[in-house]
Image: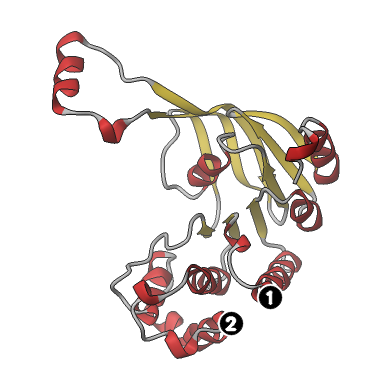
């Protein structure tokens, strides 16, 4: 059974949308001028079966984060179809879904609710989440007092404790101390052994090879290669200048 399916998916974004003045809006309305768009993904198709661990590689701007956003349901495609079966826990950026003025405990409960957990179930696993995160002494402090590493600890701990069918990770494990990174990797391996699905974006091709059996290589929004992780990484690295290889 496929848990993720992309069929000819295209996604674009308006460029410089935040810098558009009123006069520019009026000009486009009067003269029917279209705002220039950046195509982040172009006709991308693939399927991921249940229990597979897939890495997504490519240079900055290749479309990796856009792909994860589509999988996570944060935005719709312009064309094509995206089908996802099962509960998703996504770590797309630090602090996503968190409110800086709420405490760590309050953010934990809010984030768990957003991921579909009942208040009762959240109460049952609350201590386990806090213990894994290693920030118990700060859990009742507002999130604005947290470091980026503490944010990542809390976000990752929540994500792996809500029992998702699909775990989506975008590079955030590069934040934090080595001991907690190792702890995260152990949890991901446990996650794999339980037959869950993992979609993992990283600039570390070594991490992709060690964690994933399959890799998708994106370049300028197009799927260049899809196959065995070691083979895809080898070809990808062969295309990079020596000074840019991870």
Q: Is residue 204 left or right of residue 177?
A: right
Residue found at x 49% / y 50%? 72
Q: In which quarter of the image is residue 105?
A: bottom left
Crowd around label 1: few <14 · some 14–19 · many ≥20 (10 Å)? few
Q: In this view, does 203 lie above or below 120?
A: above
Q: How is the image coloured?
A: secondary structure
**Residue 196 appears at what percent x and percent y?**
67, 62
Residue 66 left/right relative to 110: right
Mark 1 or mark 2: whose residue is earlier in sequence: 2
Q: Name the residue under label 2.
A: 132
Location of residue 46 (image quadrant): top right
Residue nearer the viewer, 100 or 198: 100
Where is residue 78? Give x, y as percent: 43, 28
Q: Which mark is residue 223?
A: none
Q: Are marks 1 and 2 in contact (CB under 8 Å)?
A: yes
From the viewer's side, name the closer residue of 183 and 24. 24
Residue shown at the point (76%, 41%) measured from the top left: 245
Q: Is residue 96 left or right of residue 166?
A: left
Above or below 125: residue 48: above
Q: Mark 1 points at which residue?
A: 183
Q: Front-most of 122 and 173?
A: 173
Kindly give the residue lying farthest to the top in the view shown: 31
Residue at left offset 49%, top offset 42%: 70
Q: Residue at x 37, y 28 (%)?
A: 15
- Give coordinates of residue 139: x percent, y percent: 42, 85
């Amino acid at each position: 059974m496929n848990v993720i399916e992309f069929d000819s998916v295209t996604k674009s974004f308006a460029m410089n949308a935040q810098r558009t003045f009123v006069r520019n809006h009026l000009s486009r309305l009067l003269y029917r001028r279209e705002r220039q768009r950046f195509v982040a993904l172009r006709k991308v198709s693939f399927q991921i079966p249940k229990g597979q661990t897939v890495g997504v590689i490519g240079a900055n701007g290749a479309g990796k984060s856009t792909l994860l956003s589509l999988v996570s349901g944060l935005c719709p495609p312009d064309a094509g179809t995206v089908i996802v079966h099962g509960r998703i826990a996504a770590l797309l950026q630090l602090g996503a879904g968190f409110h800086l003025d709420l405490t760590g405990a309050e953010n934990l409960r809010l984030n768990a609710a957003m991921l579909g957990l009942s208040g009762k179930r959240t109460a049952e696993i609350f201590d386990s989440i806090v213990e894994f995160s290693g920030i118990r002494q700060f859990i009742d402090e507002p999130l604005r007092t947290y470091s980026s590493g503490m944010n990542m600890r809390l976000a990752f701990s929540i994500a792996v404790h809500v029992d998702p069918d699909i775990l989506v990770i975008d590079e955030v494990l590069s934040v934090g101390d080595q001991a907690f990174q190792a702890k995260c990797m152990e949890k991901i391996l446990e996650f794999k052994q339980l037959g869950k699905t993992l979609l993992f974006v990283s600039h570390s091709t070594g991490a992709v090879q060690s964690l994933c059996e399959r890799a998708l290589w994106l370049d300028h929004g197009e799927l260049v290669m899809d196959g065995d992780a070691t083979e895809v990484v080898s070809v990808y690295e062969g295309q990079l200048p020596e000074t840019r290889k991870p």
